[in-house]
Amino acid sequence: MCRYNIRDYGAVDDGQTVCTAWIQRAIDLCGKGDTVVIPAGTFLTGALYLKSHMTLFLEEGAKLLGSSNVEDFPVKGCPYEGLDQLCYASLLNTDGAPYEDITIAGQGVIDANGCALYQAELRDERIKRGRAVCIRNTRGLSIEGVTIRQSPAWCLHLIYCKDVSIHNIQVYTKYDERGKSYDIVNADGIDVDSCENVKITDCLIASEDDCIAVKSGRNEEGRRAGIPSKNVVIENCKFISGFGVAMGSEMSGGVEDVYVRNCTFENAFSIASLKAIRGRGNYIRNIHYENCSIVNHSDEFGDTQYFRGALYLDGFYGAKEFDADTPAAVDEGTPVIENIYFKDITIDTIAGNAIYLYGLPERHYRNIYLENVKAHGKYGMKVKNIDNLQLINVDVTYDEEG
């Protein structure tokens, strides 16, 4: 097993010299089981492409810093927001071919320099923003110990991956460790996109948008691909901003068998959001949230079309106005949401509803279970178009009628 220190291939840690070619050279030389070492220092780089059977190891004090020049991030086709689109490359990538056994580890930092890239990548509306880390079509992925921050869009995006372990990482997309805002929107923490057998444990996430989102394609294109996200476990994580653990809103390949356990949410806006709107089709089912608590004292967001409260299922996500009483025609775009479990949940929030459960009139959400739930919100609990709602030891209080 060989170790390739990027300094030996010309990389310099002045934070000003673009080191892309030298770092990529070290990666390309890797054989099976080899390691590329990022030593202490700040190494400026454009898009890098990983390969099978390798480890990228960031030593303590090491930083991969994204270039501020969009030309260092080639435009390529890549799924984003549920559709195949032209996107700027991410800081760390795979190219979409099948890969195996990739590890990213250490105590260093992957900083995508999103504040510099965000506005530049918005100039051409045809091209979508890059991410900090975008790993595609990989079986056997491990990410451990590192800090990932300041992405121009979603921070860690996993697409068509299987057998994934993410452990003890820190993700910052709203602000840095000192609380300085990045002013970047739609900056999810981790997106699990049409992936299978994923375990996320002991992570800290400070997100501008969804902390973790479990997704699987959008509308007809997502149904045609038909690759679900399933068997996802999220345990012992701490969320200190953002919108909790979401299912959807891109879920047209299906989302099933997701377990969120033993997690805390501090000044985040929600524990759970399930967003399955008309046109998506397919299903969200067998979703479990257990032993989770939220304390939120921020009133930055109220009850809006994109956010309903601490625990919500929303069949009209994104709609400023909607009619929850008049059914639409049922077709392949009508989603199924069923078998959703909330157990041992504590909610204390001043933002939006404590609990909001709104299904579609043409296909009610069904089999929704709440057990041992104690919830306090600005508003209380709202329910519409739900079949077989079971409440066991549920206590909801509120500050205002709404």
Image: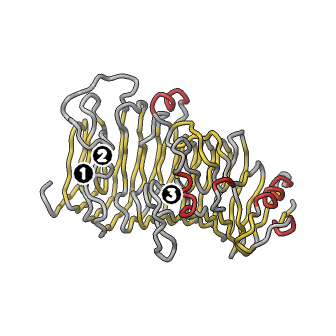
Relative to 152, residue 177 above or below: below
Relative to 248, residue 347 above or below: below
Tell me where residue 174 appears, x and y as whole percent. 46, 64
Residue at numbered disc 3: 189
Of tags 3 and 1, the one toward the viewer is 3
Residue at numbered disc 1: 392
Q: Secondary structure at mark 1?
A: strand
Q: For the N terminus, give its image quadrant.
A: bottom right
Q: Earlier in the sequence, mark 3 or mark 2?
A: 3
Task: Residue at 47% x, 54% y: name it.
Answer: 212
Q: Is residue 325 left or right of residue 188?
A: left
Visible in this render: residue 358? yes
Q: Quadrant of residue 145?
A: bottom right
Most extreme residue toward the left is: 401
* Amino acid identity at mark 3: Gly
Residue at numbered disc 2: 369
Relative to 253, residue 81 above or below: below
Residues packed near mark 3 inside 10 Å, few (<14), some (14 to 19) or many (20 plus)? many
Task: Residue at 52% x, 57% y: name it.
Answer: 119
Q: Is residue 10 left or right of residue 298?
A: right
Q: Quadrant of residue 245?
A: bottom left
Relative to 163, residue 204 above or below: below
Marks 1/2: CA distance?
8 Å
Tell me where residue 315 appears, x and y as whole percent. 31, 39
Marks 3/2: CA distance?
27 Å
Q: Is residue 338 left or right of residue 167?
A: left
Of tags 1 and 2, the one toward the viewer is 2
Visible in this render: residue 237? no
* Amino acid identity at mark 2: Tyr
Residue sitting nearer the eye, 85 or 249: 85
